[in-house]
Amino acid sequence: MTVYGAAPAPVRPQHRGYQLLYQATSALRRGSFAATLTPTTLNCACCDRRWAEVEAPFKAVEYHYGKCGEAEYVCLTCYTPRIPSQDILGLERMNVTGKTLTPIYGKLGMLVGSGGIIRPEAELYLTLPPKLFEKYRDGEWDQQGRLSIEKPFERLISLLIKGALDPIEDGFVYIENWGRKVDGLMRQLMPTKSLHELWCNSESGASVLDLHAIITTAQVMSDQGLASQAGRFAFWKPILDAAKGQRDDKAFAQWLVNVPDPAALLQAIPTDPYDRLKLPAVLGWIMPHLDKLLPYCQTKNQPLSAMFLSAQSSTQPSVASKPSTESAHAEPEQGKLF
């Protein structure tokens, strides 16, 4: 027999992302008409955490997937992206049904192509495409300066160089894309506590990026007079081809000739091939702010990979996207290219 109402469990480090989202979105829930109830299940149907572990212990919302979907119980944190808000975000559109006009208000879980960053102080900043940004100009979050049309990673770098994500070891949340599939995002919402492991959350799940190694790569390139090449795909092509399993020995040999100190550069670049595929794009954002980012490479934090792996289900990773479990498992020799 299951006993409900027991004492809440201590917050696990890998649940810090949920805690931050819950704290940052309290205004959304204040305006919600959804009724809470005591669940009759063991876990949240979305994040699969026990009811004692969620931010509002033993409180749930009954949710139906589609018009004919079976009712399931989700925790208040996982329900939050599904809440429409007239005041916080604003009007998305007017839905026309015959002669009836129904206002449709914005939801976090419907911000396709939008990202977000939650600071350690539980302040949420949203990055929106220009059209969505214009729709939500009258909402409270825009009035508070929480909305921008920057790209998600650009906004992340902007907050980093301002010190707005300090102390990083306290944890922040980086959301690459809210998307339309709330369950995919909320199933494993990972906090970042070290730039060695920047957790990129999206509707496709969580993947990890070694931002520390890429910043170090930028420094090495700057020292070798290669700063102008950092964001060029042509410069990185032999490395990118090798990361995709398409090694070109002749092109790589020429690359070694063109780089003043190839050994130092190969030692700096990330070990994970999926991180290497992102080198031109990420370096393009990093290089203009290198001096302000370098201080973050002077500290080390304990990674969350092991905790993430213990909570992950045994699903097969997609070939087209970076598998978060592989990057967490693999610790190849730094600088090994092939």
Image (tube, rainbow, N blue to C red):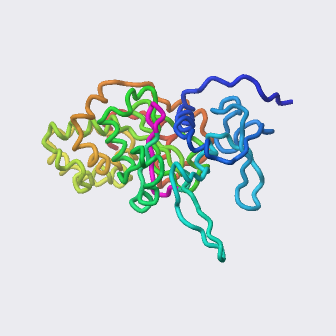
Q: Residue furthest right?
A: 1
Q: How many marks?
A: 0
What stretch of residues is rendered in magenta? 111-123
Residue at image position (42%, 43%) is 144
The answer to whether 102 appears left or right of 72 in the picture is left
Nearest to the observer: residue 193 or residue 267: 193
The answer to whether 53 appears left or right of 166 in the picture is right
Residue 18 sits in which quadrant?
Answer: top right
The answer to whether 82 appears left or right of 215 in the picture is right
Instruction: Give coordinates of residue 258: x percent, y percent.
Output: 14, 48
**In the image, is residue 113 part of the stretch drawn in magenta?**
yes
Instruction: Give coordinates of residue 223: x percent, y percent.
Output: 15, 36
The answer to whether 81 appears left or right of 246 in the picture is right
Residue at image position (60%, 26%) is 11
Instruction: Give coordinates of residue 90: x percent, y percent.
Output: 51, 55
Residue at image position (19%, 41%) is 221
Instruction: Give coordinates of residue 153: x percent, y percent.
Output: 37, 47
Quadrant showing the N terminus: top right
- Is residue 86 placed above or below 266 in the rendered structure? below
Nearest to the observer: residue 13 or residue 308: 13
**In the image, is residue 114 part of the stretch drawn in magenta?**
yes
Residue 76 sits in which quadrant?
Answer: top right
Nearest to the observer: residue 250 or residue 8: 8
Q: Residue furthest bottom?
A: 98
Give the main secondary structure, helix, strand or loop, of the magenta stretch. loop
Quadrant showing the C terminus: top left
Residue at image position (17%, 39%) is 222
